[in-house]
Image: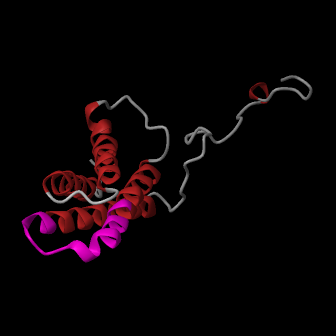
């Protein structure tokens, strides 16, 4: 496990538990799905060591954590007037904090990787053609 993985996993668990047991306002469901995706990104390399993720670990963590944080913050803004600070509201606030923790862990992981955010459809591990045979001649598609 990488150094930022436990932080992201804790944030994901908090979003899942707080989102399910607390009040579900507006976009909480999206944050719960993002938390499940974060848990998958964090645990998959340990469960299937030969499997490569399609993008860099940090880019995936930041994108997923950003979705969860944005969904929870927007839910908080939409529901802000309706909070009465009961147990379910506290669990919802914990889920908001969990989404922010997931985004923070993703940012730290991306920074540790060198800070290059990449979610393009090109191969993340490819540096381009390495031999002349890898390049198609002009006019041949």
Quarter of the rendering containing residue 50: top left
Quarter of the rendering containing residue 104: bottom left
Image height of 121 relative to 22, above or below: above
13 displayed left or right of 123: left
Dominant SS of magenta comes to helix
The mark tally for this picture is 0
Residue 57 location (% of width, % of height): 42, 48
* Magenta stretch: includes residue 74: yes
* Residue depicted at x 45% and y 57%: 113
* Residue depicted at x 18% and y 60%: 23
* Residue depicted at x 64% and y 42%: 127
Residue 131 location (% of width, % of height): 74, 31
Nearest the camera: 64 or 114? 64
Residue 136 location (% of width, % of height): 82, 26
Q: Which residues are magenta?
A: 71-90
87 displayed left or right of 39: left
* Residue at the left extreme, as displayed: 87
* Residue depicted at x 30% and y 45%: 42
Residue 1 location (% of width, % of height): 26, 47
Quarter of the rendering containing residue 106: bottom left
Image height of 132 relative to 117, above or below: above
* Magenta stretch: includes residue 96: no
Quadrant where the image shows the C terminus: top right
């Amino acid at each position: 496990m990488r150094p930022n993985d436990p932080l992201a996993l804790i944030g994901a668990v908090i979003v899942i538990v707080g989102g399910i047991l607390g009040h579900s306002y507006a976009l909480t469901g999206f944050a719960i799905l993002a938390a499940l995706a974060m848990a998958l990104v964090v645990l998959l390399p340990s469960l299937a060591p030969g499997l490569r993720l399609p993008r860099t670990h940090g880019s995936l963590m930041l994108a997923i954590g950003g979705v969860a944080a944005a969904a929870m913050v927007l839910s908080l803004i939409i529901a802000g007037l309706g909070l009465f600070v009961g147990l379910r509201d506290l669990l919802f606030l914990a889920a908001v904090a969990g989404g922010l923790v997931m985004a923070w862990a993703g940012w730290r992981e991306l920074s540790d990787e060198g800070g290059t955010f990449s979610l393009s459809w090109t191969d993340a591990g490819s540096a381009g053609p390495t031999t002349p045979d890898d390049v198609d001649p002009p006019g041949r598609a």
